[in-house]
Image (tube, rainbow, N blue to C red):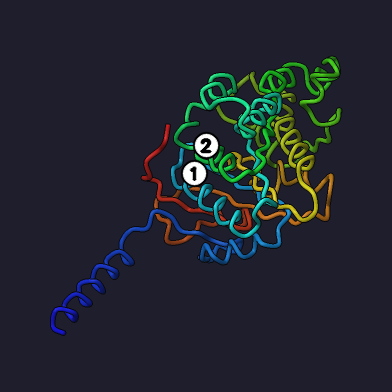
Amino acid sequence: MKNFLILSIITLLLFSSFKSGKPAYVLYNKDGKPVKYEKMLKQMGNADIVLFGELHDNPISHWLQLELTKDLYLQNGKNLVLGAEMFESDNQLIMDEYLSGKISQRNFEDEIKLWPNYKTDYKPLVEFAKDSGLYFVATNVPRRYAALVNKQGFEGLEELSDEAKTFLPPLPPAYDSTLNCYSSMMKMEGMGSHVTANFPKAQAIKDATMAHFILQNWKPGKILLHYHGAYHSQNFESIFWYLKHENPALKIVTIHSVTQDDISELTKKNTGTADFTICVDEDMTRTR
């Protein structure tokens, strides 16, 4: 009995020390109030689309992406569809061949365009999709076409072949230059003469393309979880704006990621940028 009491006290002390120690992140709701992961997950049960805005080099973002993917799969099974900015639309065939087992992992990784941190941060998501029989959408615009827009505007896309246009949204894409996500790009410091009216349009064609392929691969009864940089859905703009422009009835949940020196309270600047915000300690290790 005495040993049991001692063990219980030690366990209680250890638990208390972990609980009062420094957390790696805190999850906040739209109003800047701390919220439990389970509550966020429950809200996503009614969503059509979940936009997960990550910090590309943040391990907490990537870990939570994988955990959320697993939990949404437990809730929705094969009705879950995955999609990501990190794969370009002209690589969908290679993605499909790998997921269906037609080509090897080596061929897949040799031939598809991969981000430098693929193996640590995005490979677990692709492998989970493969093992679980989930479809994974390569949503982003081929980078050469974003460069073309930066040089010639949306008009440059009109001269592409019909085959090339299958990797793009219908042309010309809708565009609202007054959205902060685009207008703020015209004021970026250090860009100098590189900032032209086409600069934010190159960002917009990415958003428009991602929204287009999200919608192409979603249908009622499904939930599509999309991974992308935080900027692409921040303040309910960018991809979110394009999705709502095409289908105002969509139920969309957004997740944003930020870092702060002090994560015990969400700053005013970071409050209201999404339905849920992952606030990570600024000292967190970076993945690239």
Which residue appears at 58% of the width and 39% of the height?
A: 130
Residue positioned most to the bottom: 1
Residue matched to label 1:
62
Q: Which mark is residue 122?
A: 2
**Which of the two discs, 1 and 2, labels the residue nearer the N terminus?**
1
Q: Quadrant of residue 176?
A: top right
Seen from the viewer's position, the closer of residues 273 and 64 is 64
Residue positioned most to the left: 2
Q: In what quadrant of the picture does the C terminus appear?
A: top left
Q: Are marks 1 and 2 in contact (CB under 8 Å)?
A: yes
Q: Element type at marker 2?
A: helix
Q: Element type at marker 1?
A: helix
User: Where does the image place residue 245, in percent across and percent down from the top left?
Assistant: 83, 45
For residue 190, side relative to residue 238 (left or right): left
Residue type, label 1? His
For residue 67, side relative to residue 245 (left or right): left
Q: Residues within 10 Å of mark 1 (few under 14, many from 20)?
A: many
Which residue appears at 56% of the width and 42% of the height?
A: 131
Q: Quadrant of residue 87?
A: top right
